[in-house]
Image (cartoon, rainbow, N blue to C red):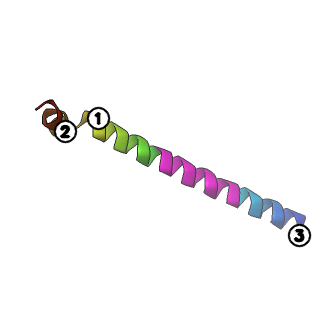
Amino acid sequence: NMFHRCIDKGLKFLRSEWLIRSIVEYRMANIVQYHCDPFDTIDRSE
């Protein structure tokens, strides 16, 4: 029973870690795209 509880905690932890990591990567990709898009910078300079 304790063993299953430990596995359950581990799975919840891994799931939250994966979720946080995917959110961070998604946001970082958006930030990079936002700042590095050539059309975007051209539009801003004009």
The secondary element bearing badge 3 is classed as: loop
> Which image quadrant for residue 35?
top left
Which residue is the extreme one toward the bottom?
A: 1
The range drawn in magenta is 12-24
Q: Quadrant of the N terminus?
A: bottom right
Q: Residue at x 73, y 56 (%)?
A: 10
The residue nearer to you, when weighing 37 against 15, is: 37
* Residue 32 point in image, percent of width and height: 33, 37
Q: Give the amino acid type for the residue marked by disc 3 in the picture.
A: Asn
Q: CA distance from mark 1 to mark 2?
A: 8 Å
* Residue 31 point in image, percent of width and height: 36, 39
- The tag earlier along the polypeptide, 3 or 2, is 3
Residue 1: numbered disc: 3
Residue 35: numbered disc: 1
Is the residue 39 above or below the residue 22 in the image? above
Q: Residue at x 55, y 55 (%)?
A: 19
Is the residue 1 above or below the residue 45 in the image? below
Q: Give the amino acid type for the residue marked by disc 2 in the picture.
A: Asp
Which residue is the extreme one toward the front?
A: 46
Q: Residue at x 53, y 47 (%)?
A: 21
Instruction: Report if the CB atoms under discs 1 and 2 are less than 8 Å apart.
Output: yes
Q: CA distance from mark 1 to mark 3?
A: 51 Å
The secondary element bearing badge 1 is classed as: helix
- The tag earlier along the polypeptide, 1 or 3, is 3
Tell me the mark number nearer the camera, choosing from 1 and 3: 1
Whether residue 34 is in magenta: the answer is no
Q: CA distance from mark 3 to mark 2?
A: 56 Å
* Residue 12 point in image, percent of width and height: 69, 60
The residue nearer to you, when weighing 45 against 18, is: 45
Q: What residue is shown with label 2?
A: 40
Callout 2 environment at 10 Å: few (<14), some (14 to 19), or many (20+)?
Answer: few
Q: Residue at x 75, y 64 (%)?
A: 8
